[in-house]
Image (cartoon, rainbow, N blue to C red):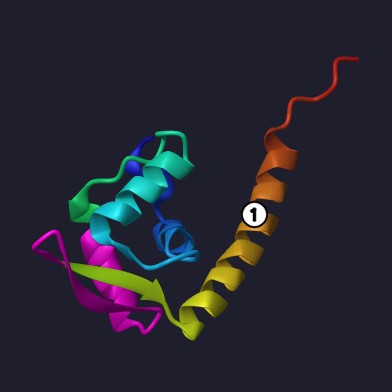
Amino acid sequence: MRPEVLKGHLDALLLAALEDEPRHGYAVIEALRTGSGGTLDLPTGTVYPALHRLQSAGLISSEWHTVGGRRRRAYQLTASGRAALAQHRDVWDRFSAAVTALLARPAPG
């Protein structure tokens, strides 16, 4: 998928990837890849700066953990992040319905 298609949707996708459980950066990338059937295969250079920006905005928090002798930062949604995700979903539902209505093929006739 072309990167410009994701413009304006990256925050919502990252928040959604963290909705069910805390994840470290690579697990967030994997959740997006698997959840999209491989369509969203984002580079670390896109994901990590966005995670840091979301944390600065108070939408996610993070804690350091040691797993298998390696330190990893696990990110999780804050209450503000959950509210932002709900708002992103509402906007997406309205936007995607409008685009689908416009791009749907007319019935032959």
* Residue 18 percent coordinates (x, y): 42, 64
Q: Does residue 96 appear left or right of residue 63 in this picture?
A: right
Frontmost residue, 34 versus 15 = 34
Q: Please tell me whether residue 61 is drawn above or below residue 108 in the rendered image.
A: below
> Is the N terminus in the top left, top right, bottom left or bottom right quadrant?
top left
Residue designated by label 1: 95
Which residue: 37% across, 84% down? Answer: 58
Which residue: 71% across, 48% down? Answer: 97
Which residues fall within the magenta stretch? 48-71
Looking at the rendered structure, the number of numbered marks drawn on it comes to 1
Which residue: 41% across, 35% down? Answer: 39
Which residue: 44% across, 81% down? Answer: 78
* Corner quadrant of residue 65: bottom left
Q: Please tell me whether residue 76 is drawn above or below residue 12 in the rendered image.
A: below
* Residue 13 percent coordinates (x, y): 45, 57
Q: Does residue 65 appear left or right of residue 96 in this picture?
A: left
Residue 49 forms part of the magenta stretch: yes
Q: Does residue 80 appear left or right of residue 107 in this picture?
A: left
* Corner quadrant of residue 21: bottom left
Q: Residue furthest right?
A: 109
Amino acid on which the number 1 mark rests in the picture: Phe
Circle 1 packing at 10 Å, graded few (<14), some (14-19), many (20+), is few
* Residue 61 percent coordinates (x, y): 33, 80
Q: Please tell me whether residue 17 is drawn above or below residue 6 in the rendered image.
A: below
> Is the C terminus in the top left, top right, bottom left or bottom right quadrant?
top right
Q: Residue furthest front?
A: 68
Task: Describe the element under mark 1 as helix, strand or loop.
Answer: helix
